[in-house]
Image: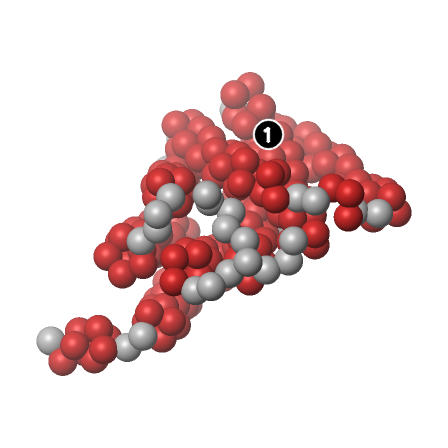
C-alpha cells in the first residue's frame, strides 16, 4: 500500500522511468533463467502491463494508439506461440499492421521538397540493399518455413519494417520535433526487435543473446511510445501526427 501511494505521488515521467527499470530487471532475470518459453511470456506480460498503464495513467485522444497497443499485445501472443503456424501468422500480421498505421501518420508530414537528390540516392541505396539482404536471409532459412503464407508474411514484414523506418526518418529529418523523434526511435526499436526475434528463431544462432537484444529493443520501444503519447497529450509541440 505504501509503495502504491509512493508510486502514485510521482510525476508521470518518473513513473515511466520506474516502471521501465522494473521491466528491465524482470526481463534480465527471465533471460538469465535461459528458458525460451519464459522469455516469450515476459514479452506478453511487459506489453500488457504497459498497455494497462497507458490506459489508466496516460491515454491518448487518437484511437490509433489504442489499436497499436492491442496489436502489440496480439503480436506478443503470436510470438509466444511462434512454434505453431497460427502464432507465426499472428505475430507477423500484427507487426505489418503496426507498421502500416505508422506509415499512414508520417506520409502526410514529410516535406518531400526539403529532401535533396543526393539524400534520396543515398537513402534509397541503403534501403534497397537492406531489402535485397532481407530476401537473401529469408531464402537462406527457407527449409525452416513450413507454409507459403509464412514465407510471404516474412517477406512483407521485412519490407514493411524497412519502409516504415525510411519514412519516419524522412519525416523527422524534414519536420523535426520532439514527437517526430520519439516516434522514429520507437519505430526503429520495434522493427529491430522483430528482426532480432526472427534471427533468434530461424537461424538458431546464439538464441539467448538475440532474445536479449529483442527484449532490450522492444522494452525501449514500449517506453518511447508511451513517452510519445505523453508528449502528444500534455506538452506543447509544433506538430501533431494524429490529428
Residue 199 figure quarter? top right
The residue carrying mark 1 is 156
Q: Position of residue 167 (x, y in %)?
A: 65, 43
Query: Disc 1 on helix, strand or loop?
Result: helix
**Quadrant of the snapshot with the N terminus:** bottom left
Q: Residue at x 70, y 52 (%)?
A: 174
Q: Residue at x 35, y 40 (%)?
A: 63
Q: Residue furthest left?
A: 1
Residue 20 visible? The answer is yes
Answer left or right for 25 relative to 127.
Answer: left
Residue 90 figure quarter? top left
Q: Is residue 184 above or below residue 144?
A: below
Q: Nearer the viewer, residue 28 or 64?
A: 64
Q: Residue at x 60, y 35 (%)?
A: 160
Residue 56 figure quarter? bottom left
Q: Is residue 28 above or below residue 200?
A: below
Q: Position of residue 193 (x, y in %)?
A: 53, 51
Amino acid at each position: 500500500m505504501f509503495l502504491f501511494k509512493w508510486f502514485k505521488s510521482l510525476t508521470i515521467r518518473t513513473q515511466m522511468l520506474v516502471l521501465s527499470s522494473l521491466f528491465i530487471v524482470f526481463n534480465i532475470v527471465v533471460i538469465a533463467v535461459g528458458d525460451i518459453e519464459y522469455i516469450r511470456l515476459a514479452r506478453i506480460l511487459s506489453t500488457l502491463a504497459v498497455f494497462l498503464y497507458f490506459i489508466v495513467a496516460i491515454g491518448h485522444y487518437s484511437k490509433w494508439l489504442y489499436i497499436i497497443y492491442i496489436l502489440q499485445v496480439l503480436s506478443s501472443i503470436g510470438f509466444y506461440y511462434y512454434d505453431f503456424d497460427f502464432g507465426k501468422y499472428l505475430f507477423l500480421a500484427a507487426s505489418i499492421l503496426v507498421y502500416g498505421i505508422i506509415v499512414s501518420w508520417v506520409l502526410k508530414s514529410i516535406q518531400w521538397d526539403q529532401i535533396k537528390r543526393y539524400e534520396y540516392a543515398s537513402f534509397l541505396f541503403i534501403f534497397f540493399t537492406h531489402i535485397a539482404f532481407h530476401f537473401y536471409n529469408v531464402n537462406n532459412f527457407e527449409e525452416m518455413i513450413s507454409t507459403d503464407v509464412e514465407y510471404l508474411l516474412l517477406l512483407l514484414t521485412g519490407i514493411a519494417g524497412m519502409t516504415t523506418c525510411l519514412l519516419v526518418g524522412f519525416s523527422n529529418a524534414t519536420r523535426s520535433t520532439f514527437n517526430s523523434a520519439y516516434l522514429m526511435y520507437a519505430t526503429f526499436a520495434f522493427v529491430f526487435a522483430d528482426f532480432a526475434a526472427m534471427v533468434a528463431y530461424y537461424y538458431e544462432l546464439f538464441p539467448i543473446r538475440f532474445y536479449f537484444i529483442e527484449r532490450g529493443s522492444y522494452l525501449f520501444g514500449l517506453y518511447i511510445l508511451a513517452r510519445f503519447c505523453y508528449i502528444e497529450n500534455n506538452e506543447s509541440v509544433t506538430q501533431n501526427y494524429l490529428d
